[in-house]
Amino acid sequence: MNISDILCYATVFAILNAAQPAFAKEKPAQESAPQFTHYPVDQRYSGRNHPLLMDSFGKEYKTRLRDAIAHEKPEFAGHYIVAGWGCGTGGCNTGAMIDAITGQAYPFPVAMSSVYPLKSERQFKESVT
């Protein structure tokens, strides 16, 4: 299972968990929600974080990603650093998972990135006139 699969499953879980109808039978929190303790990690990476891999995503967000690599330690699945940042508007957030071993950064899925759709400059001008 690669990071894209993990992020996809996490997104689906978050959406389904939030959309659960009020009339659904309530179960104790321990039984109904998956817990990280159910998925133990065999080994935790404790070495030095690898420098950022400068692919197109790494180049686009190099400041935020390098900052996370410099100041954070792996906190997800044994060797991934979770980095998040705002987009400059209320409620808009995005981020990435960074493999501390390889330096490869994976963007959050779009469903997790922002609550507001992006508009082109033309669409923006039309909406304010």
Image (tube, helix red, strand yellow):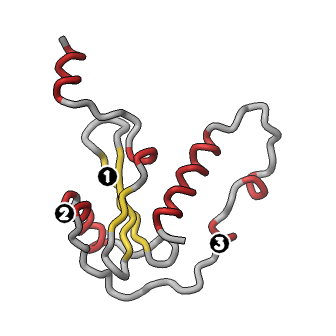
The quadrant where residue 40 appears: bottom right
Q: Which one is in front, 55 or 95? A: 55
Q: Pointers 2 and 3 in contact (CB under 8 A)?
A: no
Q: Is residue 20 above or below residue 61?
A: above
CA gap between label 1 and label 3 equals: 27 Å
The quadrant where residue 87 appears: top left
The quadrant where residue 48 appears: bottom left
Residue at mark 1: 85
Kindly state the secondary structure of the residue where label 3 is placed: loop
Q: Which amino acid type is marked by label 2? A: Lys
For disc 3, the neighbor class at 10 Å (few under 14, some 14 to 19, many from 20) is few
Nearer the viewer's eye, disc 2 or disc 3? 2
Nearer the viewer's eye, disc 1 or disc 3? 3
Kindly state the secondary structure of the residue where label 2 is placed: helix
Q: Which one is in front, 71 or 55? A: 55
Rendered location of residue 90, percent (x, y): 33, 35
Residue at mark 2: 59
Q: Residue at x 32, y 72 (%)?
A: 104
Q: Is residue 23 above or below residue 112?
A: above
Q: Is residue 16 above or below residue 32?
A: above
Q: Which amino acid type is marked by label 3? A: Tyr
Pick whichever of labels 1 and 3 is earlier in the sequence. Answer: 3
Q: Residue at x 50, y 83 (%)?
A: 44
Q: Is residue 105 above or below residue 41?
A: above
From the viewer's perspective, tell me whether residue 2 is left or right of residue 87.
Answer: right
Residue at mark 3: 39
